[in-house]
Amino acid sequence: MAVNPVTGASNVDFGGVAKKDQLGQAQFMQLMIAQLRNQDPTQPMDPANFLGQLAQFGTVSGIQGMQDSISTLSDSLRSSQVLGGTSLVGHYVLADASEGSIGATGEIAGTTTIPEGATEASLVITDSSGQLIRRMPISNQQGEAQFLWDGTTDLGTRAPAGNYTVSAIAKVGGVEEQLATQLVGHVGSVTIDPNNYSLTLNTDLGPIALGRVRRVM
C-alpha cells in the first residue's frame, strides 16, 4: 500500500465506491485498517478515539437501517389499508355524518349518543333550504340511541327526493343540546389518493374518509 509523500495519506482502493458521499461498512473498515497500518509509531491512535469512530459509524448505519425498516413497514401498512378499504365495497358503514338523501323511496338511519341527565331527545330533519321537514322523538336513555327516518314529513306525506340534514337534540337541565350524529351509508366504490394512499369511501351519503367510519355492517 502506497503513502502519498506530500499529504502522508494512504492511497487506498475502496473497490469502486458507487457514490462519493456514501461510505459502506466494507469501505469504512478498509479506511480504519489503513489508519492503523499507517499511523505514526511514536503517536499511536488513541484506542478511545478509535472506538468512538466505530460507535459513531455504527449509530449512523443503525439509523439508516431503521429508516429502511420504517419505510418498508409504512409501505406494508399502506397496502393493508388499501386492501382493507376495497373490501368495504358493497357493505354498509356507520360513519360520522349529518347529511343524507332519499329518493322516491328509501330512508335514513343512524345513531347518536344521549348524554347523562337528558329528559328528552328528538331528531330534526331539514331540507337544503333549512326548512323543517320532520321532528320526531327518539330514546332519551343515556348512551347510544338509534333512529330511523322513513322519509315522511310532519304532515304525513312523502318528502321530495333530495338531500336532507339530520340533527339530534337532547334537553339536559332544561337546555337543548345539539348532538353529533352517525348515519348509515352504502359503499359503492373506493377512491385511493395516489399521493398519500388515503382512502375515501364513495357512499350514498357522499364521499366519506375512512377515518370517519365507526362501524362496518
Image: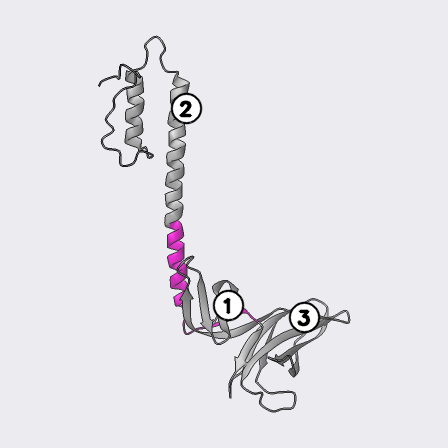
Residue 86: x and y in percent read 39, 67
The residue at the point 28 percent across, 29 percent down is 27
The tag earlier along the polypeptide, 3 or 2, is 2
Name the residue type under label 2.
Answer: Gly
Determine whether, in the image, residue 187 is placed left or right of residue 164: left
Residue 213 position (above or below residue 47):
below
Q: Is residue 139 magenta?
A: no
Mark yes or no: residue 88 visible.
no
Q: Which residue is mark 2?
A: 52
Tell which residue pokes out farthest to the top in this image. 42
Q: Residues within 10 Å of mark 2 (few under 14, many from 20)?
A: few
Q: Secondary structure at mark 2?
A: helix
Nearest-to-viewer mark from 1 and 2: 2
Q: Which mark is residue 178?
A: 3
Q: In this orientation, which residue lies closer to the viewer: 195 or 111?
A: 195
Q: How is the image coloured?
A: one colour
Q: Which residues fall within the magenta stretch?
A: 73-97
Q: Residues within 10 Å of mark 3 (few under 14, many from 20)?
A: few
Cα separation between marks 1 and 2? 54 Å
Residue 95: x and y in percent read 53, 69
Determine whether, in the image, residue 176 is placed left or right of residue 47: right
Name the residue type under label 3.
Answer: Gln
Nearest-to-viewer mark from 1 and 3: 3
Cα separation between marks 3 and 2? 63 Å
